Amino acid sequence: MLRYAVCLSLTFFLVGCGEPIANLDQPKDANNNAVANSEAPPPETASSSPMTEQATTETPSEEKPPEEPAPEPKPKKGVIHQTTDEVVDAKEWLKKQGIEARDGNIEGVDPFSQAASGYFTLAARASTLGLQQQVQHYKALNGKFPSYKEFMQMMRDNRIEFAKLRWYEIYGYNEDTGKILVLVDTVAKEEGP
């Protein structure tokens, strides 16, 4: 009995009740047929001549102008759901002034900034997880972490991209520790976009 009720409800859900929603508001006659709206043009009468019918059904032999291609959509300004394959050598970048490795903590003083920070922190962790495991497998097989060049080759070979970060953040790979880090440019962060 339950199976029958589930099948019946799925049928109504998928097929519908048979009458389009737009026709529900139209008045009905005695046979439950929709009555023509007063705004609709009147139906043709029997007195129309065959010549007028033929003239109305024929289309003029004008050529249509060629269709213009649709404009390309503008790129999104935000970074949510966008990806990047840009990874820098963390050892070199950490030597620069104003660059520091982010510790992975969620920042923010209010719930909205904490939610945004949480999105970027968790997206970075989730998107780098698979490649981080490949680095660990490489170390188990070779006894050392891959060099920066080998790491980038692994990314290209597997077509791996990470979640895009904010304008002042970039991914970095440290070949000494085998870790994929998020590097923060504190100077750019303070200056703003």
Image (spheres, rainbow, N blue to C red):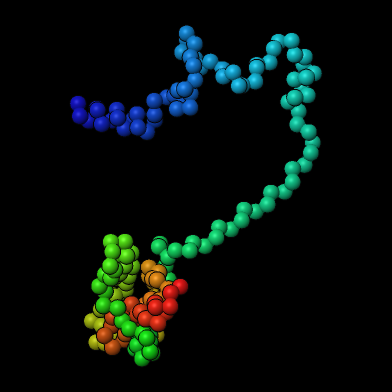
Quick one: quadrant of the C terminus? bottom left
Residue at the limit of the structure toward the top, as seen here: 30
Name the spot of residue 46 as percent of width and height, x first.
Answer: 71, 10
Name the spot of residue 89 as percent of width and height, x first.
Answer: 38, 85
Establish if 31 lies above or below 151. above
What is the quadrant of residue 2 in the picture? top left
Establish if 27 lies above or below 102. above
Q: Residue 119, can we see it?
A: no
Q: Residue at x 24, y 87 (%)?
A: 143
Q: Residue at x 69, y 12 (%)?
A: 45
Depth order, front residue of 142/48: 48
Depth order, front residue of 36/69: 36
Q: Residue 6, can we see it?
A: yes
Depth order, front residue of 144/106: 106
Tag count = 0
Q: Residue at x 47, y 8 (%)?
A: 30
Name the spot of residue 146 as percent of width and height, x first.
Answer: 32, 84
Q: Residue at x 25, y 72 (%)?
A: 105
User: Horizontal placement of 71 versus 79: left or right?
Assistant: right
Establish if 118 lies above or below 32. below
What is the quadrant of residue 187 in the picture? bottom left
Residue at the limit of the structure toward the bottom, as seen here: 95
User: Horizontal placement of 189 versus 130: left or right?
Assistant: right
Residue at the limit of the structure toward the left, as seen here: 1
What is the quadrant of residue 148 in the picture? bottom left
Name the spot of residue 64 as percent of width and height, x first.
Answer: 74, 43
Quick one: quadrant of the N terminus? top left
